[in-house]
Image: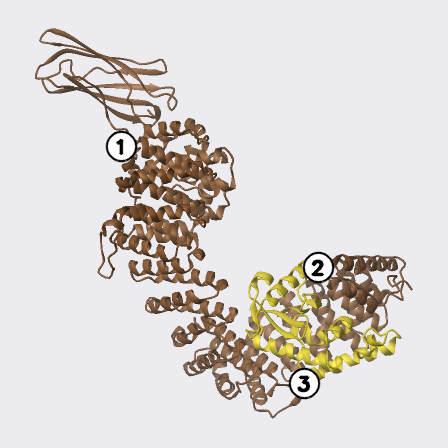
Amino acid sequence: MIKAVMMLNTQGKPRLAKFYDYLPVEKQQELIRGVFSVLCSRPENVSNFLEIDSLFGPDSRLVYKHYATLYFVLVFDGSENELAMLDLIQVLVETLDKCFSNVCELDIVFNYSKMHAVLDEIVFGGQVLETSSAEVMKAVEEISKLEAASNSISLVPKSVSGWRGR
Amino acid sequence: MNPFSSGTRLSDMIRAIRASKTAAEERAVVRKECAAIRASINENDQDYRHRDLAKLMFIHMLGYPTHFGQMECLKLIASPGFPEKRIGYLGLMLLLDERQEVLMLVTNSLKQDLNHTNQYIVGLALCALGNICSAEMARDLAPEVERLLQFRDPNIRKKAALCAIRIIRKVPDLSENFINPGAALLKEKHHGVLITGVHLCTEICKVSSEALEYFRKKCTEGLVKTLRDIANSPYSPEYDVAGITDPFLHIRLLKLLRVLGQGDADASDCMNDILAQVASKTESNKNAGNAILYECVQTIMSIEENGGLRVLAINILGKFLSNRDNNIRYVALNMLMRSLTVDSQAVQRHRATILECVKDSDASIQKRALELIYLLVNENNVKPLAKELIEYLEVSEQDFKGDLTAKICSIVEKFAPEKIWYIDQMLKVLSEAGTYVKEDVWHALIVVITNAPDLHGYTVRALYRALHTSFEQETLVRVAIWCIGEYADLLVNNAGMLDLEDPITVTESDAVDVVENAIKHHLSDVTTKAMALIALLKISSRFPSCSERVKSIIGQNKGSFVLELQQRSLEFSSVIQKHQNIRSSLVERMPVLDEATFSGRRAGSLPASVSTSGKSPLGIPNGVAKAAAPLVDLLDLGSDDTPVPTSSSNNFLQDLLGVDLSQPSAQPGAMQPSQAGADILMDLLSIGTPAPVQNGSANGDLLSIQDNNAPIAPSLTSPTAPSSMMDLLDGFGPTPPKSEDKSAAYPSIVAFESSSLKIEFNFTKQSENPQTTDIVANFINLTPNVYTEFLFQAAVPKFLQLHLDPASSNSLPANGNIKQTMRVTNSQKGKKPIVMRMRVGYKINGKDVLEEGQINNFPRGL
């Protein structure tokens, strides 16, 4: 089971954090800080896996990938395949890339709720829901359309032009 | 518009937060926003509700409290529009948890939305349920989820399948309901649904053995066929990851097959062929392919025995190990670790490669590999492996040294074929990474050294050599100093030379030099210095020629600011100065520590210390009062005030050296050092007894020590009063306490001696009444004349009671002896010693003789 999905920037600011086991806010922040302090001290060219039992309890693994200014982090337990989790990060990033056409940190910051829409289509309650980014895109676009149709306020803008235009 | 009014857009707020230069500024922005949101909530402002909540979620992510928005979530969920519901459910997942009572209120909304005509709203509700479902909700909503498993839209079906997983995890009993729908999902053609369906079935099998039986019988063949189909299917871009078709589905299927095959030979047999095919055909140059291989290996290792397949699997891992990608090596090590229980022989074959991984530049891989190597060590390969690891210790990174040292020490200890090898390896580790060696490890080393009498000389010489190259390794210094203190004579006279040794010439003053360096070295801490002081005291006795020099070195610490050192040097100075006669017996070699007792205590340090403190009467915090408890407790004194887990090492040190580590620095309270001092004395004095640490056997002498100890200990508080301390030593020195053997408990004294008569006193204690002493007086006639009408009279001060029995005879034969018994009861026992005046009258050849005297040399403590 996946315990948490995080996106942190290289300064340690959380850009997206979702915990699939309930944790109080303070604990969540502590974990985010803990994960960041481990990640930022990792040299390059080392494996993407970490054991972080100290933070998330026994049998917890962490896989991360570093893209530009962002760390994508998945925390999961022993029942998941580590290498597959690495591929899942790839799927997530590819999907975001399709959503925002060349995704950057700012897209993620300002499209907080769309990020969650994407994530909820990929990871569902700690389980992998969908691994095809095309399928995810389809589902997210449906949601955007629905929001646009039913109300004038659009919380999930279809593209980045949304916030840049303002 | 005021940018911080509730009319702020989400993006404006994010921008304001991002523009904050300091954390305080950010807090101020968030505070204003929160105030605005609260106000808007109070006004029940419908238009901005979803926007407020969206902001709250962002604020929540930054780590600020957002509980006041929880009810807003529920209101949004209850509203009809899709965007409101979406935000509401998102908030529900992020801001609430299944334990909060608010959740009770949401169940009904969820039920309605699960039955909604808009499938996207159904999707939202499923998603929320999958994230926050509680046991009650699971019971209430399971029928809806079950129905949705057959929904026409595949997106809903797959969400429902995952939601069902959450439900059966919360309430395993509900798994029955999902067996049939789950089995139906296995025949799905839609990849996404198939993956979730396979996952659901795996979970059902885990919670219900009946379901496992069912799936094993009905579905194994179907699953094998499905796996074969995807393995052989042509390229399908939709689910392709880096050229491998649908690795996620592969993995899910392999996981389910693993569950089905485990413990069932028929099912395992059924899947052998396809596993072999996947294991041999999957391309291994991409991460996705390796993920499948990795999962396949796990399945092969878990299902029922098939030798050929296992060899294939272990070989795949072997290939992984030599892969350039760190991730692949990492999982290979993980997997090898798990395979160890299945086939350790096969894993052993990759030992060399694993050992290479210990030297990897990647810390995670190093750590894994080290753990694996640790598990691979056995009696046969310990020597080469330990050699490799110790060699690597020299070049390894600082961060890794701690782990590495601990593991090396552990394997060396566990599998050492002979003591000399163990000592050699430990010395290497100590000189290389002494700082990382844990206390109990070097304590154990000392225990082993004491237990190997033929290696004493070799060890002390090796340590002496090592000291010259690695003086900065404090642990090495400690062990060396201890050994030099104990075996200084062997160091100098090259006794017990082994064939393999190079002879060295060490003079007596060289030995003193080393210890002196340790005292003066800036890196040495209190423990090391205290140990060095003891070593010096011992050397002073072993090498009388160095006595003066030792005295001056010890003297330099008389002014130490550390109470422990100051007290020690004062005590030792007086031992060297004034008490030459007892020094040699004080500093005899430490008795051999029992290895079994030590390792037992080491293993069970926690329960042991708990039980001893349980024995202490009424938990009196002060050690002096507690002296009435058995000897073990006495030695434990120091640990009473320190945290329990460390007590075992403290005990050990006290046993060994009387060093009380923690107190002088941690607690400068007046009583503490005096306890430590008393401990040292106690330890020193008990050197003569064969096994001072043995439980129980020493009760008797303890009772007698305690009486002296209690009143005197307070005077020890002032370390500037060595005389009172020496009194104590005076009393004890010549009469070291012995164990329960009554005749030996107090040595006999010569009470009186003249040219014609000698009187000896022998003492026995009545165990039921410690104040009473039985004295047997032995009168010896030193002349060839017969003494007639022999009469012995005695007088005692008021605090004593004396009872005289008749003598065995009233005539003392020439050169013969008679005996007389008396009983003395000392009401001031422990405060005042026994004194006695006596008068002896007799006749030699009819002539009266009268002899008088005072007896002051009664042993202390009577």
Residue indicated by mark 1: B581
Q: Pinpoint residue A7: horizontal percent, then vertical percent.
A: 68, 70
Q: Between tags 1 and 3, which lies in front?
A: 1
Residue B120: % across, % down: 79, 77
Q: Which lettered chain is shown in brown?
A: B
Kindly indicate whether the residues beneath marks 1 and 3 are on one polypeptide chain: yes
Q: Are marks 1 and 2 on the same chain?
A: no
Q: Chain of mark 3?
A: B
B263 vs B587: above or below: below
Q: Amino acid at mark 3?
A: His
Q: Is residue B259 left or right of residue B547?
A: right
* In the displayed structure image, the side of residue B593 where residue B784 appears, left or right: left
- Please tell me the numbered disc located at residue B190: 3
Q: Say whether disc 1 or disc 3 marks the residue closer to the N-terminus.
A: 3
Q: Which residue is mark 2?
A: A25
Total numbered badges shown on the rendered structure? 3
